[in-house]
Amino acid sequence: MHYDVTACWAIFPTCLCHSLTKISVISFLFSAYKASAVDKSPGDDGITNRMIQAAGPKFTNLLHEVFSTLWVHEIQSAAWQMSLMQPIYKGGDKSKADPASYRGIYLSSALAKLFEGILISRLTKITETHSTLTENQLGTRSGRQIHDAIYCLLSIIQYNRSQKGLATYVAFCDFSTAFPSIHQGKLLSLLFVGRMWKHFRERFHIVKVRVLHPRIPKSSSVDILRGVPEGSRLSPTLFEFLVADLIHTSHGEITVTLV
């Protein structure tokens, strides 16, 4: 099985920073196929990861052409704007009539998530090259996981207690509705260079959600007018962008994001 990898690089045009490495879309798709959970529920289009994996090399080449077209023309598929939301009852003594008693599971298009993966690959290289995020931001970055922060915290607690006889005070902050509260205008201003911000704008400026419920017709949907959608692969990284900007602003720093 042979692919012209050089032709696939057209989807990643040269960035403002010439040190960025071009990435093969075909290689990315192969890696994404292997990492995808085959039995995960599909989005509104009904296309599953198992279907994509079984489609073969011709479909992969076709998918490359589609993604290249989306990138060059800076557009997004209208079908990708629709997500399904499956409400899951939290249990306990919570009222089943109260929407807050349910946790929403969002199901997005598998094809949309593949394209989002390409955007994340490009965005991640730029953020790491230009140190856009702070050193203490972990979780969504390669080689910097949450358990590293837990290990550091435990080490500090043990050192303060055994060597200095001091207590360690820690504040844990949990952002309520973090992704829906993101200000899209501020987010786009941080990404306002090159093509990336246009793709984020097209991806999120119209988001529709259809709730999976026997009493709600399939033709009924709700427009999400703020934030970034739950279930999107981009949302965690974009949220970290805003947190980093908050930290830089509080420290009086001015940063330039190259995308």
Image: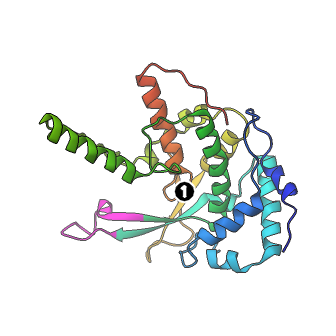
Q: As rendered, which of 126 and 180 lies closer to the eye?
A: 126
Quadrant position of the N terminus in the picture: bottom right
The answer to if 226 sits in the magenta stretch is no
Camera-nearest residue between 134 and 46: 134
Residue 212 can be seen, yes or no: yes
Q: Residue at x 64, y 55 (%)?
A: 116
**Amino acid on which the number 1 mark rests in the picture:** Ser
Q: Position of residue 49 (x, y in %)?
A: 62, 74
* Residue 244, image x, y percentages: 47, 34
Magenta residues (range) = 89-104
Residue appearing at x 46%, y 26% in the figure: 248
**Residue 128: x percent and y percent?**
59, 40
The structure residue drawn at horizontal position 69% and vertical position 75%, both measured from the top left corner, is 52
> Horizontal placement of 61 versus 155: left or right?
right
- Decide if residue 48 is in sight here: no
Q: In the rendered image, which residue does mark 1 sit on?
A: 232
Q: Nearer the viewer, residue 233 or 36?
A: 36
Rendering quarter of residue 56: bottom right
Residue at 80% in and 74% down: 57
Determine whether the residue tagged by mark 1 lies in a helix, strand or loop: loop
Q: Residues within 10 Å of mark 1 (few under 14, many from 20)?
A: some
Direction left: furthest residue:
165
State left or right for residue 40 relative to residue 90: right
